[in-house]
Amino acid sequence: MIALPDSAEAFQDATWQDVAPYYAELAARPLDRTNVEAWLADWSRFESLLSEAASLANFAYVCNTADTQLEAARLRFSSEIEPKADEQRIRLQRRLVELGYVRPGLETMVRRFRNQMELFSEANVPLFTELAKLSTGWAKAIGAMTVDWDGEEKTPPQMLPYLESNDRSVRERAFRSMFKPYVEQRDTLADFFDRMYDLRQQAAKNAGFDNFRDYAHLEKNRFDYTPDDCFRFHEAVEVAVKPAINRLLERRRAHMGLDRLRPWDMWVDPKARAALKPYENIDEFISRAGDIFANVNPDFRGYFRRMADAGLLDLDNRKGKAPGGFCDSLPARKMPLIFMNAVDVDDDVQTLLHESGHCFHVFEAANLPLLFQRHPGAEMAEVASMAMELLAAPYIDRKHGGYYSDTDAPRSRRAVLEGAVLFFTHCASVDAFQQWMYTTPEGRDADARDQKWLELRRRFEGDAVDWSGLDAERIARWYFQPHFFDYPFYYIEYGIAQLGALQVWRNSLADRGKAVRKYREALALGATRPLPELYQAAGARLIFDSDGMRELIELAEEELATLDQ
């Protein structure tokens, strides 16, 4: 093996010419059952270093999308190195599969390798290069968006605190301002999407599929459920969740004394209490989170402190920063990082708890020797994050070192659980929209897409909230959702995982210690078991039916009623 560097920094300025020899050596090295484990270990170590360098380049760019040097570095990885590296990985995967080597702990890995081999098409390498360039351009356009708020330049996410104002006119103005850039730049965003759409559909055809939906389903290694199961999920949301959401929204409307709820009435406290302000500054935000995690399990505070001390938390919102929030893995040093856009609202707390759950997953699985064993599908990864929101919620009060007084903490806890219930209709909308877009010719038509989005929102959300006169803002909501642009078909996983997380939470009500222990045991399995077995290890099961959903939603409603009191 060509001598590997000690850290990913050695690859931070790498070009494909610097990386290619490592793949060439792994492809040429004699391979048999006597040396396959050493070969896998070398391959894993190399991929860990390269992946970490790419993650750090992306992290630096999304933190400052206005920096052209950071943009160039991200593009070098995403459009020059990564597509060619994917091609080389297929060669190496084929070597292992053709050797016929498998042992306990590698079964899922080998199955994934075989699947990715079957999907690979050399003709797709330049297409994915173009998609990476479009993704960078889209992120830059979003990162540059600003709004005028009383003469002050702000980003769209910085409107969120004003949506919690008890002054309804302020809320309405903030709501319209938040979506205004997306309404104004709709044609630009639609053009980005059209070009992405064409490339994705062509990639699917190159791989032998009729449409990108069918290709993406397999590309994401969805071995344990089908597109038809996704449609069952949509229908179950209508049957089991939508009535509960109508009840929650009717309670909100009555508390607020309104004839009709409008979209800007969804963030404010329904009893006209002052908006929750969890922290004074980012340092406090970080410090108190560590104390919360210590109550769930002391190891979690240790994990979180390691990230903070290493400078792997970029949490505050600012101009030029890409939207959204995520956790990414630095596999060489076996550490994660968190990127988010905090604006001093309660939702920041939920986002940090969520992304920290992903981080704890990285830490728990880090003991698995091979990189290829550590990352399960998003269906399990999101259980790690969503369950952490629910497991940590009881400790967000000041007596546990958290953010809120005894009177404010139940409001935040209620927001977590209510948000979990309300999320299902959005999840169903997003997945149904993508299912439609990529399986019908009308999905290529920007106007048809916008109208279909409105249709799906009415189907899943009903009329509990009055959107009259706001079609442009309602349409802008799908342009606001980064997954359509950057992570296509990554969304049903959230809904599946939310049901898994609710089961972990249900178990914690009976035996908190046991529930947390099983949660950690499941995370530590990484990707070494099929998805149903990972859920089973966490004390849960995969749910696509209305009866399974209804049981969990009813339990959540009971808890919400208690928190109301």
Image (spheres, helix red, strand yellow):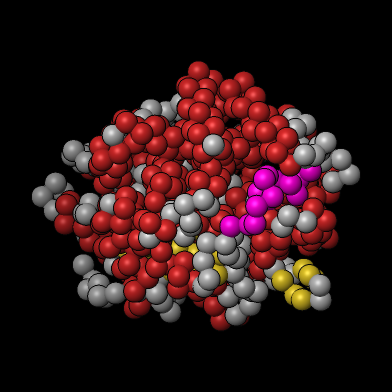
Magenta segment includes 157? no
Report x, y in % for residue 75.
Answer: 55, 70
> Extreme top residue here?
547
565 is higher (above) or lower (below) than 30: above
Front residue (pair 359, 553): 553
- Which residue appears at 16% of the width and 52% of the height? 37
Q: How many marks?
A: 0
- Which residue appears at 39% of the width and 32% of the height? 506
Q: Looking at the figure, which quarter contains the C terminus?
A: top right
Report x, y in % for residue 457.
Answer: 73, 36
Report x, y in % for residue 76.
Answer: 51, 72
- Which residue appears at 75% of the width and 33% of the height? 464
Q: Looking at the figure, which quarter contains the N terminus?
A: bottom left
Q: Residue 355: which quarter of the image?
A: bottom left
Report x, y in % for residue 350.
Answer: 50, 53
> Extreme right residue here?
469
Front residue (pair 113, 485): 485
- Which residue appears at 31% of the width and 60% of the height? 301
Which segment is the magenta one? 262-276
Taking 346 as reference, is 41 left or right? left
455 is higher (above) or lower (below) than 526: above
Q: Residue 532: which quarter of the image?
A: top left
Residue 359 appears anywhere in the view: no
Front residue (pair 272, 1): 272
Front residue (pair 107, 81): 107
Residue 278 appears anywhere in the view: yes
Instruction: From the image, give the main secondary structure of the stretch colored magenta.
Output: loop
Magenta segment includes 275? yes
Taking 193 as reference, is 385 left or right? left
